[in-house]
Image (cartoon, rainbow, N blue to C red):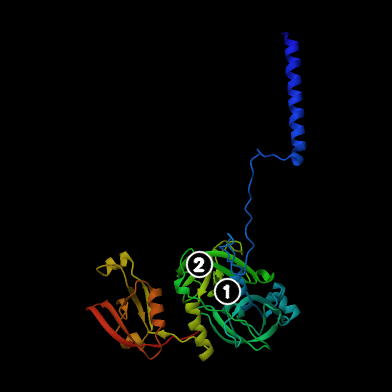
């Protein structure tokens, strides 16, 4: 068969085959197709009131937010600040011609933070720096109600403050969780009012626990989290996946002024004790023995001929203070308090501060005359 005839024959079969395939597709809805494979799609069952986030195959913390959010409030504080004066008025040569400068003008300055209602009778826990020098404080609730707040007390050594509001109607309040049981990797939610945009919830994990020596406060035991904390979040709630309060958001590490994934919250295990003291006494009550201390480093241990590093070195003793009266002297090394080893100044500070003034504490250490054990009466830590 000539090549041209073969080509026309093949082309004819290709065209016929294409027309047959098109006809089959067009007639398939009416004729049915018993040979085509059936694709089965399994529809997800409708969620029920009993089914949780895991049953729905997705992670949701809406229940935790619904439980925690109503207790988180906005805290507005107002104080008076001096308006800056032009340097012209401070030039002594010009004063000869124009006389004394006019008095500095005062203007109100309003700052924004967050807080957590922690009791049905209106106590609100927040940060001390949120209400610093405040002349008036207003609290705005989640449901839109607002009330003037009374400052019950501030504790700058932990950066905590307690307010109280008196408002008609029932007050939502937070449920305290167990901050001591938090583990690195646990999910946490930060609730507050960042930048004044309105109540906002961010989610992250516990990045670390027991953070100290950050220079943020005298007593530090922070929960570190990567949940976004921004200006305005200070004093707000850090809650666990059950909506229980585990921390008070306090500070962030930032080079830009906004969140960089490193935020710090005061654990409620510390905050509750401070709150109780502020409500009952108007100040935090802590033990104190009147010493200055520093860590025992390896070079220092060698210089003092200590058997090993550890403990804290007494670098100063307040005259006629509790430690001085007990015979503790500069150069002594404290190794344990009430049988619990101490290996850094912060640990000694925490152990002593937990004792009530008037109680006794047992100190173990090494001095010029060797190992010693002494009992001393704890005094109240001075404030200010």
Residue 45 visible, this orientation: yes
Closer to the camera, 68 or 311? 68
Q: Is residue 152 above or below residue 235?
A: below
Across and down, in percent, residue 295 comes to 36, 71
Across and down, in percent, residue 139 comes to 66, 81
Contact? badges 1 and 2 (CB < 8 Å): no
* Displayed quadrant of residue 10: top right
In this picture, residue 17 sits left or right of residue 374: right
Q: Which residue is mark 1?
A: 237
Number of numbered discs overlaid on the protein picture: 2
Across and down, in percent, residue 51 comes to 59, 66
Closer to the camera, 322 or 344? 344
Q: Which mark is residue 350?
A: none
Q: Which residue is mark 2?
A: 224
Q: Is residue 50 above or below residue 42?
A: below
State the residue lying farthest toward the left: 369
In this picture, residue 343 sits left or right of residue 306: right
State the residue lying farthest toward the top: 2
- Mark pair 1, 2: CA separation: 13 Å
Residue 227 visible, this orientation: no
Which residue is at 60% across, 88% downward? 121
Which residue is at 30% across, 79% downward? 339
In this picture, residue 245 sits left or right of residue 111: left
Q: Secondary structure at mark 1?
A: strand
Nearer the observer: mark 1 or 2; the answer is: 1
Which residue is at 25% across, 80% downward? 372
* Displayed quadrant of residue 138: bottom right
């Amino acid at each position: 068969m000539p090549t041209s005839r073969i080509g026309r024959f093949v082309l004819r079969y290709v065209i016929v085959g294409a027309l047959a395939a098109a006809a089959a597709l067009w007639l398939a809805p009416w004729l049915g197709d018993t040979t085509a494979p059936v694709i089965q799609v399994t529809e997800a069952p409708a969620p029920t009131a009993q089914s949780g986030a895991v049953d729905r195959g997705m992670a949701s913390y809406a229940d935790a937010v619904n439980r925690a959010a109503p207790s988180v409030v906005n805290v507005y504080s107002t104080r008076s600040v001096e308006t800056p004066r032009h340097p012209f008025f401070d030039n002594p040569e010009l004063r000869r011609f124009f006389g004394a400068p006019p008095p500095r003008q005062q203007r109100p300055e309003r700052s924004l933070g967050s807080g957590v209602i922690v009791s049905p009778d209106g106590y609100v826990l927040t940060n001390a720096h949120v209400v610093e020098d405040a002349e008036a404080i207003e609290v705005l609730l989640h449901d839109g109600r607002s009330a003037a707040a009374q400052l019950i007390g501030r504790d700058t050594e932990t950066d905590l403050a307690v307010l109280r509001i008196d408002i008609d109607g029932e007050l939502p309040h937070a449920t305290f969780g167990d901050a001591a049981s938090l583990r690195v990797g646990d999910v946490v939610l930060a609730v507050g009012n960042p930048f004044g945009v309105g109540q906002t919830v961010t989610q992250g994990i516990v990045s670390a626990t027991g953070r100290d020596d950050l220079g943020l406060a005298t007593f530090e035991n922070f929960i570190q989290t990567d949940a976004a904390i921004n200006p305005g979040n200070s004093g707000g709630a850090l809650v666990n996946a059950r909506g229980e309060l585990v921390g008070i958001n306090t500070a962030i590490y930032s080079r830009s002024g906004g969140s960089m994934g490193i935020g710090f919250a005061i654990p409620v295990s510390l905050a509750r004790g401070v709150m109780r003291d502020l409500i009952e006494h108007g100040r935090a009550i802590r033990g104190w023995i009147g010493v200055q201390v520093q860590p025992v480093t390896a070079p220092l241990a060698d210089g003092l001929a200590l058997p090993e590093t550890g403990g804290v070195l007494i670098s100063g003793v307040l005259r006629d203070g509790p430690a001085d009266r007990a015979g503790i002297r500069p150069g002594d090394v404290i190794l344990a308090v009430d049988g619990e080893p101490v290996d850094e100044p912060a640990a000694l500070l925490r152990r002593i501060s937990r004792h009530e003034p008037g109680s006794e504490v047992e100190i173990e250490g090494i001095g010029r005359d060797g190992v010693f054990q002494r009992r001393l009466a704890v005094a109240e830590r001075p404030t200010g």
